Image (tube, rainbow, N blue to C red):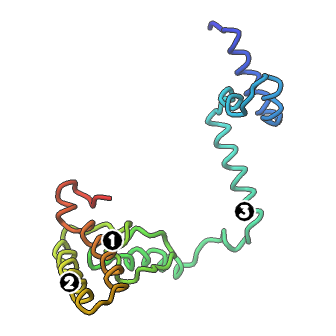
Amino acid sequence: MRFQPHDFRRTFVTDAIANGMPPHMAQIICGHKDINTTMGYNSVYPHDAIEAHRAFIARRRSLRPAEEYRTPTGEEWDQFLGHFEKRELSTGTCGRSFGTPCIHEHACVRYSLLRPDPAQWARPVEIRDNLIARIAEAEREGWLGEVARLQVSLAGAENNSPSSTLTTGRPQR
């Protein structure tokens, strides 16, 4: 192996930080004006990343109630698995995280996490056509707030419609 003098700077910074020296102190010793320069010299090894993650998990578990880390009951596990079935929508699958409430209720055509189901492509077209008719009615009646709300839904329906999906295989965002 061949070492260049600058390699020793990298070794120093890595060993100093790994052994507990605060990075800003290593920055001062190295004469760097920016902490990001010093951190660029710090090598992160896979073992260190794994150990840091394990330490993070241990700290997190020590701060959280122990009952959160118990084995789920059969009923709780079934509820968790059933969650994914409940996220099935008439027009596709919703990509929201487990346990999050849906503020969109059945208006998920507006939602960016909707994954349209190709078998249901007729539904977004029906919804889009219905929204266009409702916008026309709201404009005739002078319901300007309703027009704005319906236009947001229409944009979502058009984004999740077959015309946007057929060209790319997925909705355009």
Can you tell which mark lies on residue 130?
2
| Three-letter code, disc 2 | Asn
- Badge 3 is on which residue? 61
Q: Is residue 139 above or below residue 108?
A: below
Query: Within the image, what quadrant is residue 162 found in?
Result: bottom left
Query: Within the image, what quadrant is residue 161 found in?
Result: bottom left
x and y percent of residue 106 in the render? 35, 83
SS class of the residue under badge 3?
Answer: helix
| Three-letter code, disc 3 | Arg
- Residue sitting at 24 percent across and 81 percent down? 131
N-terminal-most mark, 2 or 1? 1
SS class of the residue under badge 2?
Answer: helix
Q: Is residue 163 above or below residue 103?
A: above
Q: Nearer the viewer, residue 8 or 39?
A: 39
N-terminal-most mark, 1 or 3? 3
Can you tell which mark lies on residue 93?
1
- Residue sitting at 54 percent across and 79 percent down? 76
Query: Within the image, what quadrant is residue 142 found in?
Result: bottom left
SS class of the residue under badge 1?
Answer: strand
Q: Nearer the viewer, residue 129 or 44?
A: 129
Looking at the rendered image, the quarter that the N terminus falls into is top right
| Three-letter code, disc 1 | Thr
